[in-house]
Amino acid sequence: MSEVDVDEIARELRLAVGRLVRRARDRTDLPAPQAAVLGNLDREGPMSTSELADRQHVRHQSVARTVGQLIALDLISSGPHPHDRRKNLLTITDAGRAALRSQRTRRAGWLAEAISSELSPEEQRALARTVPLLGRLADH
């Protein structure tokens, strides 16, 4: 078996995933920072701005700006933290959940159509076997 050049695989994978993500985006999509905040609140439940910043590995100020935009759009709400009165607890609203679901559905639909039209059944099976590997890399 020949040796694998992991550096080359990493470069090509980064480029391919980047192109794939850009192609799946739509002009009507929420900006990436807003979608990330909504996604975190949807998956993990209410949290403070500092907890969001930690999870996203960004500065508190960046998340605070995004949170302000999402509150103005009524996609999240802010209320008192039950254990620390100095903090606010952010919660995704029904409108935020609907916006996120719509974006996810559209992107998944686009990707499903691309998989169906561009890949043979054998390639589709190979891709299905690859998805757990990509998940493991994302969790690293």
Image (spheres, rainbow, N blue to C red):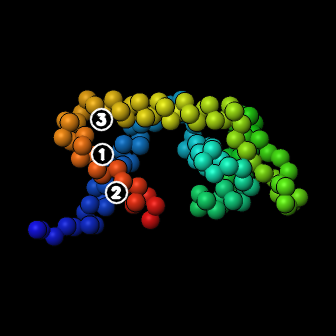
- Mark earlier in primary sequence (3, 2): 3
Query: Is the C-beta separation of discs 3 and 2 under 8 Å?
Result: no
What element does badge 2 sit on?
Answer: helix
Element marked by disc 3 = helix
Instruction: Identify the amino acid type marked 1.
Output: Ala
Mark 2, residues whose alpha carbon is within 10 Å: few (<14), some, or many (≥20)? few
Residue at far bottom of view = 3
Left/right placement of residue 66 relative to residue 26 reads right
What residue does disc 2 label?
133
In-image side of 128 versus 33 (left or right): left
Q: In this view, does 28 lie above or below 2?
A: above
The image shows residue 12 at horizontal and vertical percentages of 28, 55
4 is higher (above) or lower (below) than 110? below
Q: How many labels does the image show?
A: 3
- Report the Cα–Cα distance between label 1 and label 3: 11 Å
Q: According to the image, label 3 marks what residue? A: 115
According to the image, label 1 marks what residue? 128
Name the residue at 43% across, 58% down: 138
* Residues at marks 3 and 2, CA–CA distance in whole angstroms: 18 Å
Q: Quadrant of residue 110?
A: top left
Specify the quadrant of the image occupied by residue 117: top left
Q: In what quadrant of the picture does the C terminus appear?
A: bottom left
Residue 2 in the image, given as x and y percentages of width and height = 12, 68
Amino acid carrying mark 3 in the image: Ile
Instruction: Give the alpha-carbon distance from disc 1 to disc 2, as whole Å.
Output: 10 Å
Outermost residue, right side: 85
Q: Which residue is drawn at 33% across and 29% down?
A: 113
Left-right relation of 80 to 60: right
First in sequence: mark 1 or mark 2? 1
- Front label number (3 vs 2): 2
Q: Do the residues labelled 1 and 3 touch (CB within 8 Å)?
A: no
Residue 15 seen in the current view? no
